[in-house]
Image (tube, helix red, strand yellow):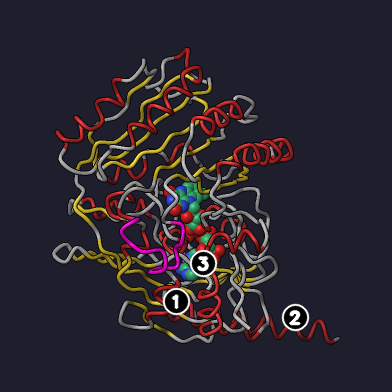
Amino acid sequence: MDHERQSTASFDSAADLLKSDLRGDLVRIRDADYEDARRIYNAMIDRRPEVIVRCAGVGDVIDAIKFGRAHGLPISVRGGGHNVTGNALADRGLTIDLSLMKGLRIDPRLRIVRAEAGLTWLEVNHDLQHFGLAAAGGFVGTTGVAGLTLGGGLGWLVRKHGLACDNLVSADIVTADGRFLQASKEDNPDLFWAIRGGGGNFGIVTSFEFEVHPAGTVLAGLVIHPASRAREAMKFWRDFETTAPRELTTGALLFTAPPAPFVPEDAQGTPVVGIGGVFTGDLEVGEKVLRPLRDWGSPVADIIEPMPYSAAQTMADALWPHNFQNYWKSDFLNGLPDDAIDTMVAKFSSVPSVMTTVVIEHNGDGAMNDVRRGDTAFWHRDSSYNLLVTSMWEDRRNAEENISWTKDFVEATARFASGGVYVNYLGEEGSDRIRSAFGSNFDRLTAVKQKYDPENVFRLNQNIEPAD
Ligand SMILES: Cc1cc2nc3c(=O)[nH]c(=O)nc-3n(C[C@H](O)[C@H](O)[C@H](O)COP(=O)(O)OP(=O)(O)OC[C@H]3O[C@@H](n4cnc5c(N)ncnc54)[C@H](O)[C@@H]3O)c2cc1C
């Protein structure tokens, strides 16, 4: 046997041995379920891990890390598989897949939930709904709890209850050397600080403990106006937002009206602006708060209505279906002057794909500003608005046209950008952009990285290199 065949044979037998030790599963290229196991949200990503360990618990995570390091494999971590960069998959490496880990324990009395790292927000809020409670997750239901929380976590409850990471009470983590640690304000506080906004750089979080909040029935939905009124509608929304209470979180969407029953036939397939929001609190108060937004202009559709919070959590999911080509760009904005709105609306008129949505989130002027910027790794608390261009299309061959349109869009709006970017919306954009995701917290993050992952084992992410 030559050297290469010999080492392949020993790798194979080590992988077989690991597989037999796992409570979960191990999938290799030759296995029938390999293609399913490597599928993530963004169909544009075509990375082929050598080994995918589908963990069932903490023990599997520890074994997988040891295996990956022993064989010199690049290691990636998959939570919900939603990151558009595709960092969940390690090309020719080891993917540690947590998506089978869906344990959830709710303590309704203390309003605390412990969620394993494979859960999505839809799953967490589905169960919490039975107790009239909700977790501050994202704007859609299908995103993973893990990646979203580690990068900060913007969602429908951000103005009332802050970022997902602001609601984190503690986390269980396996570090690069296979140690199991707990992180909270009391235990390993430096690590706890870093995982609230620093991304997946510091270890593999196996479960998260969150504070959750009364929600029950909320007032939620969307008011849609034709593109011809988009400028005025967005300016009205921006001004309306300046006096909106924290109970209300809203965003504006430029998109193409879907063939949905709630959209009149003549508006279907045309560009529109939607103002979407969730009001959590007394419904009568909510009706009054939202009235001016619903009365403005002549909307083509008004689908704001009372619904369980778990339904609000999933109401936008249809705009971002799985298995399509995705290319995203994002910037925090300093504000939303008229000129910025005019530029966005003008640029959207040439959008090449009917699946593309431009989102302007209003996250600020609320609970996320109650936490100081240095208190967690999430820095950009002062940026009230976030621009997110989610280009999506079906045919791989249309990549160039969609990517160049997306780049043009953010180039045109760059003068309104704060210079910061949200790590969870960041693409493969180089080390300067990674720095700008962490602002003045960056140096402190490199020191924490040096302490917990000095060899940069966890580098398939928006990578923070260990301090020298
Ligand atoms: C359709 C869609 C909607 C979105 N909506 C929102 C939104 O409303 N609000 C928002 O804030 N963001 C949103 N995002 C962005 C989202 O937060 C990021 O893509 C996030 O990384 C997704 O987490 P995940 O676990 O699903 O992804 P994955 O791709 O599985 O993981 C992303 C990265 O996170 C790290 N990671 C994941 N799990 C762990 C773990 N357990 N331990 C350590 N590191 C880990 C790894 O570095 C991994 O590469 C959205 C993305 C999509 C595609």
Q: In which quarter of the image is the N terminus?
A: bottom right
User: Callout 1: few (<14), some (14-19), or many (20+) C-alpha neighbours within 10 Å?
Assistant: some
Task: Decide: is 238 above or below 437.
Answer: above
Marks 3 and 2 close (CB-CB < 8 Å): no
Identify the disc placed on residue 23. Answer: 1
Count of numbered circles in the view: 3
- Residue sitting farthest toward the right: 2
The residue nearer to you, when weighing 334 against 403, is 334
Is 375 magenta? The answer is yes
Q: Where is residue 58 in the image (x, y as percent from the top left)?
A: 42, 78
Q: Position of residue 422 (x, y in %)?
A: 51, 55
- Does label 1 or label 2 sit earlier along the sequence? 2
Identified at 56% across, 84% down, the residue is 66
- Residue sitting farthest toward the top: 266
Give the amino acid at mark 1. Answer: Arg
Q: Give the range drawn in magenta.
A: 368-380
Residue tagged by mark 3? 440
Residue 82 seen in the figure: no
- Does label 3 or label 2 sit earlier along the sequence? 2
User: Callout 3: few (<14), some (14-19), or many (20+) C-alpha neighbours within 10 Å?
Assistant: some
- Label 3 residue SS: helix
Q: Where is residue 217 in the image (x, y as percent from the top left)?
A: 20, 42
Prevalent SS, magenta region: loop
The residue nearer to you, when weighing 139 against 82, is 139
Residue tagged by mark 2? 8
Identified at 58% across, 54% down, the residue is 426
Is 196 magenta? The answer is no
